[in-house]
Amino acid sequence: MEEVISALRTPKAYPHRTTEVKKITTAISHVFLTGDYAYKLCKPVNFGFLDFSNLEKRKKSCEDEIAFNSLISPELYLGLSTINQDESGKITIDGKGNIIEYAVKMKQMDPESTMNNLLRDQKVTTENIVQLAKQIHQFHQKAPEDEEIRSYGKFETVKFNWDENFQQTEKYKDVLIPTETFTNIQQKIHSFLGKKQELINLRVQKKKIKHCHGDFYSSNVFINDDKIHIFDGIVFNKRFPCSDIIAEIAFMAMDLDYHKQESLAKTFIEEYQKLSGDNDIPKLIDFYKCYRAYIRGKIACFTYDDPNLSTEEKEKTKQTAQEYFQLAERYAQHFL
């Protein structure tokens, strides 16, 4: 993979005009920005919840990502590209020779036009939010849905997910989450689940459990010329994206709250409910917003353990975790 990465850093590896290549690295992928197009490669990793350990698995992940995300933003996802190596050892995208890797080819957007950057600069409008609600609602109408997917919305799975959250954050009590906050949220959740088992299972019967985007928050939305592009939906593990659609919209609403944009969050929920006619939203929205905030806090806890963090990064991560847990506790006070 290192040889491939080195080759793709150079403009001559691409079949189109490219003057500069920028590389972005995430936990599971390498992304190369070339100007007009972006190419996303899976890292050869196996984390248990995802397995990209061989070429065929990486190819399938790319194909699945293209097929699924094309339901949301077909204009962004342009198809599967091959990384080829010829007899001389030259490595190119969609070139000659043996296929040694695969990549998702995408239309490149301005990285600064992600919604989280625009929220930071106070540039997200009510009209943007109305359009966002419309587009995610349209996606939910055609999102995959079958017996297996519905099973992820059953009460037992919802409870399991919460029990896992508490188990995985137990050791961070009085480090990143005050014991009082932890206990308060846990009690509120157990009380809510005890009262709402029938409602949660009824959502399954109503076929409100879909293969959702799964990571629907502002970092995965482009707003460009007032057009909305939702990207990077999860395909590598069904337990993450398969959920009640209320859990999906709760993620975006929570994220808007986190960015101190409560009025936009309220508009988003109201617009989605108007479009969907889903009268269960007020009954479950705070529960799922609490879940999403707690998950973000938990992720910050895991990041906090990274030995490579600088003192400054560690302190910032601690603050982030505390902010999300405070937000989760706030939602827990509002359960119906």
Image (cartoon, rainbow, N blue to C red):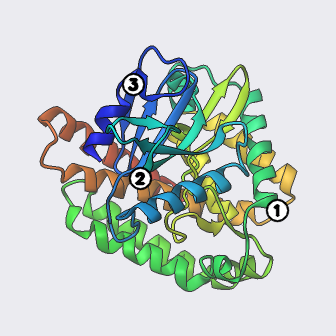
**Three-letter residue code for mark 2:** Arg
- In percent of width and height, residue 101 lies at 42, 50
Q: Residue at x 56, y 47 (%)?
A: 232
**Three-letter residue code for mark 1:** Asp
Residue picked out by circle 2:
296
- In percent of width and height, residue 62 lies at 53, 54
Secondary element at tag 3:
strand
Residue picked out by circle 1:
278
Whether pointer 2 and pointer 3 mark residues with C-beta atoms closer than 8 Å, the reply is no
Quadrant the C terminus occupies? bottom right
| Mark 1 → mark 3, Cα distance in angstroms | 43 Å
Whether pointer 1 and pointer 3 mark residues with C-beta atoms closer than 8 Å, the reply is no
Q: Residue at x 53, y 81 (%)?
A: 157
Specify whether residue 68 is in view: yes
Q: Give the farthest residue toward the top.
A: 19
Residue picked out by circle 3:
22
Q: Nearer the viewer, mark 1 or mark 3?
A: 3
Q: Residue at x 53, y 17 (%)?
A: 17
Front residue of 210/123: it is 210
Q: Earlier in the sequence, mark 2 or mark 3?
A: 3
Decide: is 332 above or below 72: below
Instruction: Return the mark for residue 202.
Output: none
Residue 50, picture quadrant:
bottom left
Decide: is 333 above or below 69: below
Residue 282, picture quadrant:
bottom right
